[in-house]
Amino acid sequence: MDLSRFVSSVTPSATLEFNKKVLDLAKAGENVIKFTAGEPDFPTPRPIIEAAIVALNEGKTKYTNATGIEELRSAIAAKLKRDNNLDYSPGEIVVANGGKQAIYNVLKALLNLGDEVILISPAWVSYEAQVKLCGGIPVIVPSRIEHGFVPEIADIERAITSSTKVIMLNSPNNPTGAIYPEEFLRELANLCIERDLFVISDEVYEKLVFDAPHFSIGSIQGMKERTAVINAFSKTYAMTGWRVGYSATSSTVAKAIAKIQSHLVSNVNTMAQYAAVKAFEVDTSDMVRIFRERRDYVVSRLEDMGVSFNRPAGAFYVFMDITPYIGSRYENSNDFALGLLDKEKVGMVPGSAFSYEGFIRMSYSSSMEDLKEGLDRLARFL
Ligand SMILES: Cc1ncc(COP(=O)(O)O)c(C=O)c1O
């Protein structure tokens, strides 16, 4: 069977694959410590669950508008104004199945065959695959640990060609935890306006910030028409399984996305949309405080071990430099991650999953007990 070359050009999500390996070992009875997860280990807050139950009892079980229920899109528009100084009307919001589908919708709405999309590496696993699935060409611009994994404007500028259409940004960043400073985003905005480029700004970790404020590039004058803001309820409200995210774009792009959405999914699960409306009333400061305490603990343990890493300012990952172990004990980051899993039963995701060799990602979305045990094992392994 001759499969589509778009599909053949991508591999399954490496983070989900590693996560599965860890879960399989745990199922087989091994005492595995899982630092692979890309999701908060907290339960979804009770008021959100109750709102879904109420919606079910009220018979909110039918199709909705393809772009999402009015209450949710209005609540999102209000949030974008309140938190991010962004001016979007409910008609410019499209509710999608998680941030993941929201990004895909935007790429699908924008890309023609052969259009180039600049990705900053280390890059979240799905960007490259989604660009390829839409017929685009990913162009990878590495950021460096010496600059706190904030990319250099000059490096981005050098990567721009006549085929460049989109720059993909992710701040707070998965996997580095970097938060891009406002000055950098202002410089980048100037470049985008000058070179007529579009930005997809993935802000799904926006609320998980510890050391620096989050700033949305779309709030800069002249950027609204050329920015898609992506956000989701998954990480902020521990709602990964509910699959609710959204894009905010100019109305031209929003209408294109609405067409895609109407043919692809009809709408996002109706009761999950009603539950998401409730989420805006939930205080998540305790979750953020706990993540900050874990971050501080992990950072101090890694410093004691002499490991190089970028101190994460947001999200719940730390990206460690393992180059001293590559070439001798282990061939590459994948080999290292497999070795760590095999010898010490600690699961982490290799940098190769983020198009970045010589590094490994640890998620600290685990209990303090697991963090202590897992880091003891890592120290022994190193
Ligand atoms: C950077 C980034 N963007 C988007 C997503 C997708 O989130 P969702 O679960 O809302 O689809 C993730 C999930 O891991 C992520 O890490």
Image (spheres, rainbow, N blue to C red):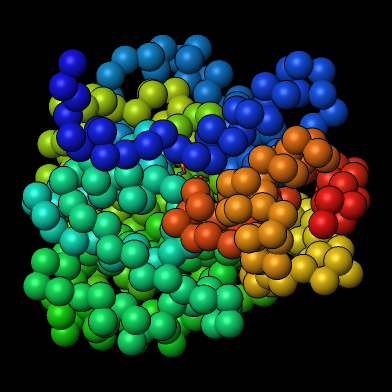
Q: Position of residue 18 (x, y in %)?
A: 59, 36
Q: Position of residue 336 (x, y in %)?
A: 67, 49
Q: Nearer the viewer, residue 114 or 247?
A: 114
Quarter occupied by residue 88? bottom left
Residue at x 19% of width, y 44% of height: 134
Q: Position of residue 362 (x, y in %)?
A: 68, 52
Quarter occupied by residue 310? bottom right
Q: Is residue 113 found left or right of 308 in the rendered image?
A: left
Q: Is any atom of residue 103 visible in this view?
A: yes
Residue at x 33% of width, y 87% of height: 154
Q: Position of residue 102 (x, y in %)?
A: 32, 44
- Determine whether 69 is above or below 144 in the image: above
Residue at x 73% of width, y 24% of height: 25
Q: Is residue 356 found left or right of 327 in the rendered image?
A: left
Q: Nearer the viewer, residue 29 or 247?
A: 29
Q: Is any atom of residue 365 visible in this view?
A: no
Q: Quadrant of the C terminus?
A: bottom right
Q: Is residue 159 found left or right of 230 in the rendered image?
A: left
Q: Nearer the viewer, residue 2 or 242?
A: 2
Q: Residue at the front extreme?
A: 328
Residue at x 29% of width, y 54% of height: 248
